[in-house]
Amino acid sequence: MRLRFPGRASQASLPLVFLGARGAREGGLDLDGDGRFSDVDCDDLDVDVFPGHIEICDGEDNNCNSLIDDANSVDTAVCFHDADADGYEANEVSVYACDEPDGYAALGDDMATAYHLGTIEVGR
């Protein structure tokens, strides 16, 4: 943005520079000091949120990709499909998630509800 001074013979224009708390440049500012200016930073009040930052499971969009705690978060867990709802998974179908989705589990081996790690063996 440029300021114009009407009535001046040269019609000179000067760049408009915004002064932020931690940094400034022509057309933008960096309020949180993370090195990303407000025109690209999706949360310029949080130093831990900017484009290119790693995504972690914390309820925020850390990397400005419009996804909160997506499957690419560095601290996701592997969750496996729990076909018989016994809390143990089948190893064939899995997803990466910050929180265990419904119908998925992170434990054991899923063959049948009566058979999984930790059940009491009953004699015949």
Image (cartoon, rainbow, N blue to C red):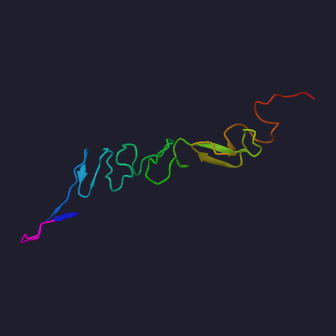
Residue 7 belongs to magenta span: yes
Image location of residue 62, percent across then percent down? 44, 47
Farthest left residue? 9
Residue 75 or residue 1, whichever sits in front: 1
Q: Is residue 57 above or below residue 26?
A: above
Q: Where does the image place residue 97, in percent across and percent down from the top left?
A: 59, 45
Image quadrant occupied by the C terminus: top right
Q: Magenta segment range?
A: 4-11
Q: Percent from the top left, x then y, of residue 122? A: 87, 28
Which quarter of the figure has residue 119?
top right
Exactly how many numbered labels are in the figure? 0
Residue at image coords 60%, 46%: 96
- Residue for point 23% across, 63% down: 1
In this rendering, position of residue 7 left or right of residue 76: left
Hey, which residue is sitting farthest front in the picture?
7
Q: Position of residue 123 (x, y in %)?
A: 90, 27
Is 58 colored magenta in this rendering?
no
Is 67 left or right of 35, judged from the image as shown?
A: right
State the residue lying farthest toward the right. Answer: 124
* Residue 94, above or below 4: above
Q: Main secondary structure of the magenta part?
A: loop
Tell me the residue at 43%/52% (across/down): 64
